[in-house]
Amino acid sequence: MVTGASEGIGRVFARRLAEQGYALTLVARNEDRLRALVADLPGVGHAILVADLSKKEGTSAAVNALSGESIFTLLVNNAGFGQLGDFTEIPLTRYEEMMAVNLRALVALAHVFLSRAKKGDGLIQISSTLSFFPMPRQAVYAATKAFVTSFTESLWFQYRKVGVTVLNVCPGSTKTLFADRAGGMRVPVPEFVTETPEQVVDAALRAFERRKGPTLVCGWKNRFAVFTARFVSRKVIVEVMGKMRQ
Ligand SMILES: NC(=O)c1ccc[n+]([C@@H]2O[C@H](COP(=O)([O-])OP(=O)(O)OC[C@H]3O[C@@H](n4cnc5c(N)ncnc54)[C@H](OP(=O)(O)O)[C@@H]3O)[C@@H](O)[C@H]2O)c1
């Protein structure tokens, strides 16, 4: 199962996994995009699940699929979105939806998947490089991703003992609809630190196959930034991040 498969990183995961022979269940809200993708994928046995993961019913539909008769050997918990803006400029409902998709649905799907997982199965969760940095003007989004990184690294430790591969993937800026859907950047992220979704997914699948958990930070520039941040105070980090987004 790949969540958020209608666009961007999830869409490339779907393509790569279908090329590897997986029969996929693709989850997102946009039915037309999911249908078009399935029609274009190699292999057989693919299904779509049109579900809004910000809603309890949508998450339940995906949970029910994972706990049904079909056997799922890999879950890519990818669906997620962000929102730019000063904290109170954005309605609370938008943050509630973000926390529902980025956190509640992700935890619920990981829970049902891991409760049935067997040796050789895998869980890939898409976090963000921002999980390592507080980010003014994306305060709630960065905090949701800090949760995902902490949560997934704990799962990695626990499930490797039973042979289930858990990987936390932290993309940096990636060329998808993400930034536009988040309201557009005032200061665009420079091209030289931006990756394509193909680069992110190929690196993630390599790390997954080699069991290089718990966390993959995508791109050496992002790895350098995360590494350097270890030697700098939290105050300096938030000052730098805040200035980048003013
Ligand atoms: N792009 C970046 O710069 C970047 C950087 C770091 C981390 N990430 C993370 O990477 C993941 C994928 O993002 P992306 O860059 O590929 O963005 P994207 O192109 O906007 O794709 C997001 C996917 O999530 C799905 N989604 C959003 N809200 C949903 C909802 N309520 N219910 C079900 N599905 C929903 C969307 O499908 P529908 O709209 O059809 O529902 C879409 O398939 C996210 O978790 C994001 O936080 C992205």
Image (cartoon, rainbow, N blue to C red):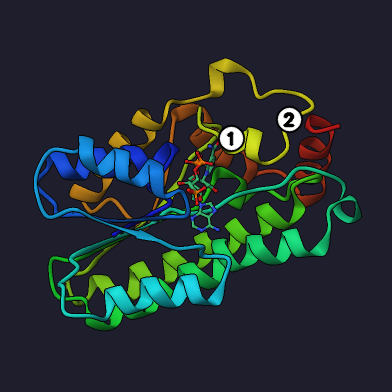
Q: For the view shown, which residue lies furthest in the right direction?
A: 88
- Give the residue pinned by disc 1: 225
The nearer-to-camera label among 2 and 1 is 2
How much space separates mark 2 and mark 1, taking CA atoms? 20 Å
Q: State the image quarter where residue 217 is shown.
A: top left
Q: Which residue occupies 70% across, 23% down?
A: 188
Q: Position of residue 38 (x, y in %)?
A: 24, 44
43 to the left or right of 72: left
Q: Position of residue 81 (x, y in %)?
A: 59, 50
Q: Position of residue 120 (x, y in %)?
A: 13, 66
- Give the residue pinned by disc 2: 185
Q: Is residue 82 visible to us here? A: yes
Nearest the viewer among 117 and 133 is 117
Q: Is residue 204 above or below residue 112?
A: above
Which secondary structure lies at badge 1? helix
Q: Tell me which amino acid carries mark 2.
A: Met
149 to the left or right of 19: right
The reply to whether the C-beta atoms of the residues labelled 2 and 1 are less than 8 Å apart is no
Q: Position of residue 99 (x, y in %)?
A: 64, 65
Which secondary structure lies at badge 2? loop
201 to the left or right of 175: left
Q: For the view shown, which residue lies furthest in the front direction?
A: 32
Q: Dot 2, crowdedness within 10 Å: few (<14), some or many (≥20)?
A: some
Q: Which residue occupies 54% across, 77% down?
A: 56
- The quadrant in which the N terminus is found is bottom left
Q: Tell me which amino acid carries mark 1.
A: Ala
Q: Which label number is shown at residue 132?
A: none
Q: Which residue occupies 82% across, 39% down?
A: 242
